[in-house]
Image (cartoon, rainbow, N blue to C red):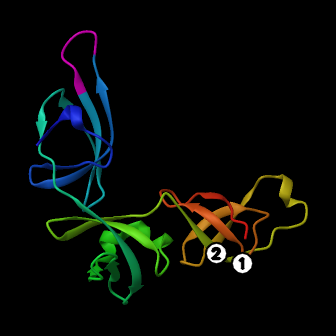
Amino acid sequence: MASTNDLKNGLVLNLEGQLWSVVEFQHVKPGKGPAFVRTKLKHVLTGKVVDKTFNAGVKVDTATVDRRDMTYLYNDGSEYVFMDTDTYEQISIDPKVVGDAAKYMLENSTATVNSHEGTPLFIELPTSVELVIEHTDPGLQGDRSTGGTKPARLETGAEIQVPLFVSTGEKVKVDTRDGRYLGRVSG
Protein backbone atom coordinates (compact mmCIF):
# COMPACT_ATOMS: atom_id res chain seq x y z
CA MET A 1 0.00 0.00 0.00
CA ALA A 2 1.12 3.51 -0.79
CA SER A 3 -0.40 6.95 -0.60
CA THR A 4 -1.15 9.14 -3.61
CA ASN A 5 1.66 11.34 -2.27
CA ASP A 6 4.09 8.51 -3.10
CA LEU A 7 3.11 8.25 -6.78
CA LYS A 8 5.92 8.44 -9.31
CA ASN A 9 6.32 7.64 -13.00
CA GLY A 10 6.70 3.92 -13.66
CA LEU A 11 5.02 2.84 -10.40
CA VAL A 12 2.58 -0.03 -11.01
CA LEU A 13 -0.77 0.13 -9.22
CA ASN A 14 -3.22 -2.71 -8.62
CA LEU A 15 -6.66 -1.17 -9.19
CA GLU A 16 -9.60 -3.57 -8.96
CA GLY A 17 -7.39 -6.54 -9.81
CA GLN A 18 -5.83 -4.93 -12.90
CA LEU A 19 -2.30 -3.59 -13.19
CA TRP A 20 -1.80 0.03 -14.28
CA SER A 21 1.51 1.84 -14.73
CA VAL A 22 1.73 5.55 -13.83
CA VAL A 23 2.68 7.45 -17.00
CA GLU A 24 2.40 10.91 -15.47
CA PHE A 25 0.90 12.55 -12.40
CA GLN A 26 0.22 16.02 -11.09
CA HIS A 27 -0.63 17.17 -7.58
CA VAL A 28 -3.31 19.89 -7.73
CA LYS A 29 -4.18 22.19 -4.84
CA PRO A 30 -7.10 24.37 -5.90
CA GLY A 31 -7.77 27.58 -3.99
CA LYS A 32 -11.06 26.16 -2.80
CA GLY A 33 -11.71 22.53 -1.92
CA PRO A 34 -9.45 19.58 -1.14
CA ALA A 35 -6.22 18.77 -2.97
CA PHE A 36 -6.21 15.95 -5.51
CA VAL A 37 -3.85 14.03 -7.77
CA ARG A 38 -4.50 13.89 -11.51
CA THR A 39 -2.87 10.84 -13.16
CA LYS A 40 -2.48 9.27 -16.55
CA LEU A 41 -2.40 5.48 -16.21
CA LYS A 42 -1.45 2.87 -18.80
CA HIS A 43 -2.90 -0.64 -18.56
CA VAL A 44 0.12 -2.92 -18.31
CA LEU A 45 -1.28 -5.73 -20.48
CA THR A 46 -3.43 -3.92 -23.06
CA GLY A 47 -1.56 -0.61 -23.32
CA LYS A 48 -4.80 1.37 -22.92
CA VAL A 49 -4.22 4.83 -21.41
CA VAL A 50 -6.79 6.44 -19.09
CA ASP A 51 -6.97 9.57 -16.95
CA LYS A 52 -7.85 9.00 -13.29
CA THR A 53 -8.14 11.45 -10.42
CA PHE A 54 -7.47 10.52 -6.79
CA ASN A 55 -8.11 12.57 -3.66
CA ALA A 56 -4.81 13.61 -2.08
CA GLY A 57 -3.53 11.27 0.64
CA VAL A 58 -5.76 8.33 -0.40
CA LYS A 59 -4.20 4.87 -0.08
CA VAL A 60 -3.59 3.03 -3.37
CA ASP A 61 -2.62 -0.62 -3.77
CA THR A 62 0.78 -0.99 -5.45
CA ALA A 63 1.82 -4.12 -7.30
CA THR A 64 5.22 -5.65 -6.67
CA VAL A 65 7.04 -5.55 -9.98
CA ASP A 66 10.29 -7.45 -10.34
CA ARG A 67 12.69 -5.57 -12.65
CA ARG A 68 15.55 -7.65 -14.05
CA ASP A 69 18.18 -6.84 -16.62
CA MET A 70 18.16 -9.62 -19.17
CA THR A 71 19.92 -10.31 -22.44
CA TYR A 72 17.73 -10.73 -25.52
CA LEU A 73 18.97 -13.91 -27.20
CA TYR A 74 16.74 -14.61 -30.21
CA ASN A 75 13.23 -14.90 -31.60
CA ASP A 76 12.32 -18.57 -32.07
CA GLY A 77 9.55 -17.71 -34.54
CA SER A 78 6.74 -17.50 -32.01
CA GLU A 79 8.33 -16.01 -28.87
CA TYR A 80 11.27 -13.90 -27.79
CA VAL A 81 13.87 -15.67 -25.66
CA PHE A 82 15.65 -13.71 -22.90
CA MET A 83 18.35 -14.83 -20.47
CA ASP A 84 18.68 -13.60 -16.89
CA THR A 85 22.23 -12.21 -16.66
CA ASP A 86 22.60 -13.37 -13.02
CA THR A 87 21.19 -16.91 -13.08
CA TYR A 88 21.56 -17.71 -16.82
CA GLU A 89 17.95 -18.90 -16.72
CA GLN A 90 16.17 -18.49 -20.06
CA ILE A 91 12.56 -17.39 -20.42
CA SER A 92 10.32 -17.09 -23.46
CA ILE A 93 8.18 -13.97 -23.73
CA ASP A 94 5.08 -13.51 -25.89
CA PRO A 95 5.39 -10.93 -28.73
CA LYS A 96 2.40 -9.02 -27.27
CA VAL A 97 4.40 -8.42 -24.08
CA VAL A 98 7.52 -7.35 -26.00
CA GLY A 99 5.41 -4.97 -28.14
CA ASP A 100 7.17 -2.09 -29.90
CA ALA A 101 10.44 -2.85 -28.11
CA ALA A 102 11.00 -5.58 -30.73
CA LYS A 103 11.64 -2.86 -33.34
CA TYR A 104 14.80 -1.77 -31.54
CA MET A 105 16.19 -5.01 -30.07
CA LEU A 106 19.27 -6.71 -31.49
CA GLU A 107 20.36 -10.17 -30.43
CA ASN A 108 22.60 -10.02 -27.33
CA SER A 109 21.33 -6.56 -26.36
CA THR A 110 20.24 -5.81 -22.79
CA ALA A 111 16.65 -5.03 -21.83
CA THR A 112 14.82 -4.74 -18.51
CA VAL A 113 12.06 -7.33 -18.12
CA ASN A 114 9.34 -6.25 -15.68
CA SER A 115 7.33 -9.10 -14.21
CA HIS A 116 4.63 -9.53 -11.57
CA GLU A 117 4.36 -12.85 -9.72
CA GLY A 118 6.52 -14.54 -12.36
CA THR A 119 4.51 -13.26 -15.33
CA PRO A 120 6.38 -10.90 -17.68
CA LEU A 121 4.42 -7.64 -18.03
CA PHE A 122 6.48 -5.41 -20.30
CA ILE A 123 9.98 -4.80 -21.65
CA GLU A 124 11.94 -1.60 -21.07
CA LEU A 125 14.78 -0.63 -23.36
CA PRO A 126 17.39 2.07 -22.86
CA THR A 127 16.06 5.49 -23.96
CA SER A 128 18.19 5.33 -27.09
CA VAL A 129 19.89 2.59 -29.07
CA GLU A 130 22.48 2.58 -31.85
CA LEU A 131 21.46 0.70 -34.99
CA VAL A 132 22.80 0.41 -38.54
CA ILE A 133 20.69 1.60 -41.48
CA GLU A 134 20.06 -1.44 -43.66
CA HIS A 135 18.55 0.52 -46.54
CA THR A 136 17.61 4.05 -47.47
CA ASP A 137 17.38 5.80 -50.81
CA PRO A 138 20.33 8.06 -51.59
CA GLY A 139 19.79 11.77 -51.06
CA LEU A 140 19.86 13.95 -54.17
CA GLN A 141 22.57 16.57 -54.61
CA GLY A 142 21.29 19.85 -53.20
CA ASP A 143 18.82 18.18 -50.82
CA ARG A 144 21.06 18.66 -47.81
CA SER A 145 19.97 22.19 -47.00
CA THR A 146 16.20 21.68 -47.12
CA GLY A 147 16.00 19.79 -43.81
CA GLY A 148 13.68 17.16 -45.28
CA THR A 149 13.49 13.53 -44.26
CA LYS A 150 13.26 10.18 -45.99
CA PRO A 151 12.31 6.68 -44.81
CA ALA A 152 15.05 4.27 -43.73
CA ARG A 153 14.94 0.61 -42.69
CA LEU A 154 17.07 -0.32 -39.67
CA GLU A 155 18.90 -3.61 -39.19
CA THR A 156 16.06 -4.71 -36.88
CA GLY A 157 13.52 -4.17 -39.68
CA ALA A 158 11.98 -1.03 -38.12
CA GLU A 159 11.18 1.93 -40.40
CA ILE A 160 12.14 5.42 -39.23
CA GLN A 161 12.49 8.86 -40.80
CA VAL A 162 16.06 10.16 -41.24
CA PRO A 163 17.55 13.37 -42.68
CA LEU A 164 18.34 13.32 -46.40
CA PHE A 165 22.13 13.24 -45.86
CA VAL A 166 22.08 9.87 -44.02
CA SER A 167 23.04 6.89 -46.19
CA THR A 168 22.81 3.08 -46.12
CA GLY A 169 25.33 1.42 -43.80
CA GLU A 170 25.62 4.31 -41.35
CA LYS A 171 25.06 3.78 -37.63
CA VAL A 172 22.42 6.07 -36.12
CA LYS A 173 21.06 6.75 -32.64
CA VAL A 174 17.29 6.15 -32.31
CA ASP A 175 14.88 7.09 -29.49
CA THR A 176 13.20 3.82 -28.42
CA ARG A 177 10.11 5.61 -27.07
CA ASP A 178 8.95 7.13 -30.37
CA GLY A 179 11.35 5.92 -33.09
CA ARG A 180 12.83 9.39 -33.61
CA TYR A 181 16.23 9.82 -35.29
CA LEU A 182 18.65 11.37 -32.77
CA GLY A 183 21.85 11.62 -34.82
CA ARG A 184 24.65 9.75 -36.51
CA VAL A 185 27.14 7.70 -34.50
CA SER A 186 30.75 8.14 -35.56
CA GLY A 187 33.16 5.27 -35.46
Q: Is residue 73 visible?
A: yes
Residue 53 visible? The answer is no
> Which residues lie in the magenta part?
30-36
Q: Label 2: few (<14), some or many (≥20) within 10 Å?
A: some
Mark 1 — residue? 169
Position of 138 relative to 89 (above/below): above
Between the C-alphas of marks 2 and 1, the distance is 6 Å
Q: Residue at x 42, y 68 (%)?
A: 101
Q: Position of residue 157 (x, y in %)?
A: 55, 78
Query: Residue 166 appears at what percent x and percent y?
Result: 75, 67
- Secondary element type, mark 2: strand
The residue sitting at 58% across, 57% down in the picture is: 180
Q: Residue at x 39, y 76 (%)?
A: 71
Q: Amino acid at mark 1?
A: Gly
Q: Quadrant of the N terminus?
A: top left
Does the stretch in magenta take in 31? yes
Q: Secondary structure at mark 1?
A: loop
CB contact under 8 Å: marks 2 and 1: yes
Whether residue 119 is in magenta: the answer is: no
- The answer to which quarter of the image holds residue 169 is bottom right
Q: Nearer the viewer, residue 180 or 49?
A: 180
Q: Image quadrant for the C terminus?
A: bottom right
Q: Amino acid at mark 2?
A: Val
**Residue at position x 54%, y 72% from top?**
158
- The residue wearing badge 2 is 132
Residue reaching furthest to the top: 32
Residue at the outermost front position: 86
Q: Position of residue 183 (x, y in %)?
A: 68, 59
Q: In this picture, is 85 found above or below 114?
A: below
